[in-house]
Amino acid sequence: MKKLFLTLVLFIATITMSFAQQFKLNGSIKDTDGQPVSFASVYLKNTTTGTSANIDGFYRLAIAQGSFTIVYKAIGYKAIEKEITISGDATADIVLSPETYSLSGVTIHANAEDPAYAIIRQAIKKRKNHLTEVPAYTSNVYIKGVQKLVGAPKKVFGRDIQKMLELDTNRKGILYLSESTSTFAFQRPDKIHEEMISSKVAGRNNAFSFNKASDLIINFYENILLEDKLSSRGFVSPISDNALLYYRYKLLGVNTEHGITVNKIQLIPRRDHDPVFRGIIYISDDSWHLINAEVYLTKNTGINLLDTLNIKQQFLKVENTYMPSNINFQFNGNVLGFKFEGYYVGVYSNYNIHPNFPKNYFTGEILKITRAVNKKDSLFWLNNRPIPLTPEESRDYIRKDSIAALKTSKFYLDSLERVNNKFGIVKLAATGYTLNNRFEGKHYTFDPLYRSIFYNTVEGWALKYGITYTKDLQDRRYYNIRPEARYGFSNKTFTGSLTANYYYNPVKRANINISAGSGIYDLNNYGSMSLLGNSINSLFFETNFSKFYKKEFANVGTTRELANGLQATLNLNYSRNTNLVNTTHFKIKDLKGEEFTSNNPFTPETESPLFPTYKALTLSATLNYTIGQQFITRPDGKFYQPSKYPVIELSYRKGISNMLSSDVDYDLVSLEVSQNRISSGLWGYSSFVAGAGKFLNNNQIFYPEAKHFRGNNSLFSVPNLRKFLFLDFYLFSTDQEYVEAHFEHNFSGLLTNKVPLLRKLKLEELVGVSYLSQPVKRNYTEFYFGLQRLIFRATYGFAYDGSKRVQHGFRLSYGF
C-alpha cells in the first residue's frame, strides 16, 4: 500500500511538472522584403505576457505546454495572430506585411484644416483622464542596454584608444553591454519602487547594472517630457495642453485593428528649433488613447550630447486602457571625434493594474539591488533572457567574460600598472601623479605641481604639497591618509598636517575623520579665491585679495545618516590661532596707482593686528534633511538621487570657554533652506537658497570665529549660488544676526534659441538676485543677468546698499 501511494505521488508530480515546464518558442520576424523587423512585440493573446525581438528580428518566448494564440506586431506593420501548440521547444518564423492606412472615406477640402487636428483635439481633451486612469500598477521588466563606439581618433593625450577601450583594429566595438530583470511598482502621482532580480554586465562579473525601469518610461500624456535627462527644458508632448502652438499635424491614414479604428498622424514642428518631436503617433477613435508612437529628436531641438534619439513605444491593451509593452531608445552622436551609437530596450510584461500594496510599501528607496542579482550563471540567462542576443553581443560577452578573471589577476594588474604608473614630469606638473596597486587596492596620489607653487604677500613665494594614500576595502569602504607640508620663503614659516579619513559604512554614508598639525588659512573660512588666482592678481596686478592667519589644530569629526534623507555631522576642534602680517611687496609688474594692502582687511594701509593670539575649543553639529529623498540601495552603498524638494539644514556651533585654556565663548545657531533645479518646464529651471542665523551668546568672539559670507572682489571666480558678485570678502562678517538669500533662474535657451546667430552656440540665459542683511550691512541687494555655456558664464550685475547703487560691472566665472 505504501509503495502504491508513493507511485501515485510520483505520477502526479510528474504530470504537474510536465504541465508547468517552460519551453522555448524561437524564430525570426522579417518584412516582406526579407529584412529583419527590429524590436517587434511578441505576446500571448489576451494577456500581458510577452517579449520583444532583438535588433536583428530574432525572438525567444518562454511558454508552457498547451495551445496558444501568439500575437506578432510592430509599428507600421499589420499584426499577425498565429495558433501554436507547444509540447516542446518550437520554431515559428514570421513575415509581417506593411500596414495599409487608407484615407478612403476621409474628405479633405482645399484650404481646410487637416482631419488630424480634430483627432488631436480629442486626444488633448482626454489627456488628463488617460494620465490618471491607472492609479497604480506592477509589472515585470527586462532591460538591455548597448553602447557602441563606431569611430574614434587614434590617440588622446598620447594614449592608444584601441588598447585603452579594447576596440578592434578599426577602433570600433561595444563599450557597454548590460541586461537586467526586475519587478516594478508605480503609484500615482510619482511613487515608484523597483527590485532588481538579475543583472549582467559584460566583462564585469561583480558589477551591478545601471538599468532602471523608471528611466525608460516616457509618458506622452505628460505635458513636458524628458526634463533634466536630455535637456534642461524638456520637450513638448504632441498631445500636451498647448501642443497646437508647437505642432502641425497630418492624417496619413486610418485603419481598423481588432474592431478599433486607428489614426496614423504625422508630427510636423511649427518651427525647426522648437523642443518638439518629429515622427508618427497612432491614436484610436472613440477612446482617443495613444496606442503606438514612433518619434525622434534631433540636435536642433536642444537635445544634449546626442545627434539623434529615436523613440519607439508599443502599447498593449489591458482591460480598458493601454500600457507600454515595448519601449526602445536608439541614439547616435559625435563628441570630440568619438562617434557612438546604441540602444536601450525595455520589455514590460505581466501587468497588474489593480495592485494591493501593503502599508508603507513605497519609501524613498526607488531601486533595491541585492548581492545575489549578479550571481546568476549563464544557464539562468539562457533560460530567462527574453530577447535573444545578437551574434555581436554574444561575442562581446564571451570575449569580455573570458578575460574578466584575467583582469583581476595579479599578473595582469601588475603588467597594467607598469604601463599606467610610468612616471612623467609633464604628468606630475599638469595633472598630478598616481601610483596604483589595484590588486592590493592601494593608491598613492601626488598633487600636481602647478597647484603647489604660489605667491602671496604674507608668505612670499611658497610651496604647498601633499600626498594622499588610499586603501580600498570591500563594498566601497576605504580609508585614506594625507600628509601635507607648506613653506613660505619670505616669512620662513613651515607648517604641516596629517589627515585621516575612514569611510566605514557606505549604506549609512558614515565616516570618521581625524586631523592635526598646522597650516596657513584664509581669514574667511569659505575662502576668498584660489591660491593660483591670488598669485596672478598679486604678481601682475599688485592686488592681494586674500588675507591669511596661522592655525595650529587638532580635529575629530564624524558624519552618519540617521534616517532616510537625514544626515548628522559632529565636529570637535581645538586650535591656536595667530595673526599674520605681510612680509614682502614683490610684484612682477608695478602698476601706477596700485599698492598692496595690509593683511588686515579693516586697516588696508596699516599692518595692525586683527586679533591677538588665542585658543579656541569649538563644537559643531549639523542636521541636514532632504524632504522626500529618493535613493538606490546596493550592497556597496546607498546612492541619493537628485531631490524634487527642498533641503533643510540646521547648524549649531559653540565656542567652549575655559576648557583647555580656550578663550572663546559664543553660541551660533543657523537655519538654511535650499533647492536646486526647480523645473519650470519650457521656461527653464530655478534654484534658491535662503538662510538666517544668530549668535545667541557672543561674549568672546575673534574674527576667524565670526559668521562669514561668500564674497567676491575679482573679475573671475568659480560659480556658486551662495556667492555674492560684489560683496567684499571680509568686511561684512558678523558676530550678531544675519539673513541671506540667493535666487537664480536659468531660461535654458528660451530666448537665444530664437536668434539664428546665437542658436548654434547653445547659450543659456540667466537672471538672479542676492540679498544680505546684518547689523553693518542692512538691505544689501545684487541683481544680475547673463549667459552661460557649459562651465563658462558671463554676467553683468548691479549692487545696491538700500536704495543706493554702490557698484556694477561684469563678472566672469568658470567651473562647475
Image: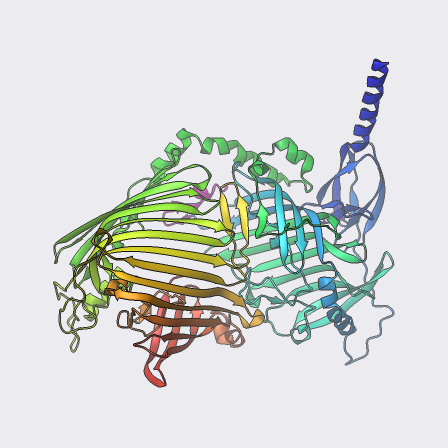
**On the rendered structure, is 769 left or right of 73?**
left
Q: In this view, does 390 lie above or below 264?
A: above
The colour scheme of the drawn protein is rainbow
Q: What residue appears at the point 56 percent right and 38 percent down from the top-left corner?
A: 396
Q: In this view, does 342 lie above or below 741?
A: above
Q: In this view, does 234 lie above or below 407?
A: below
Q: Position of residue 208 (x, y in %)?
A: 54, 42
Say whether residue 159 is magenta: yes
Q: In this view, does 160 lie above or below 645?
A: above
Q: Would you identify the image quadrant in which residue 117 lies?
A: bottom right
Q: Quadrant of the C terminus?
A: bottom left
**On the rendered structure, is 322 left or right of 589?**
right
Q: What residue appears at the point 64 percent right and 61 percent down from the top-left corner?
A: 296
Q: Nearer the viewer, residue 276 or 224?
A: 224
Q: What residue appears at the point 24 percent right and 64 percent down from the top-left corner?
A: 700
Q: Which of 461 and 731 is in front in this view?
A: 731
Magenta range is: 155-168
Q: Nearer the viewer, residue 715 or 307?
A: 715
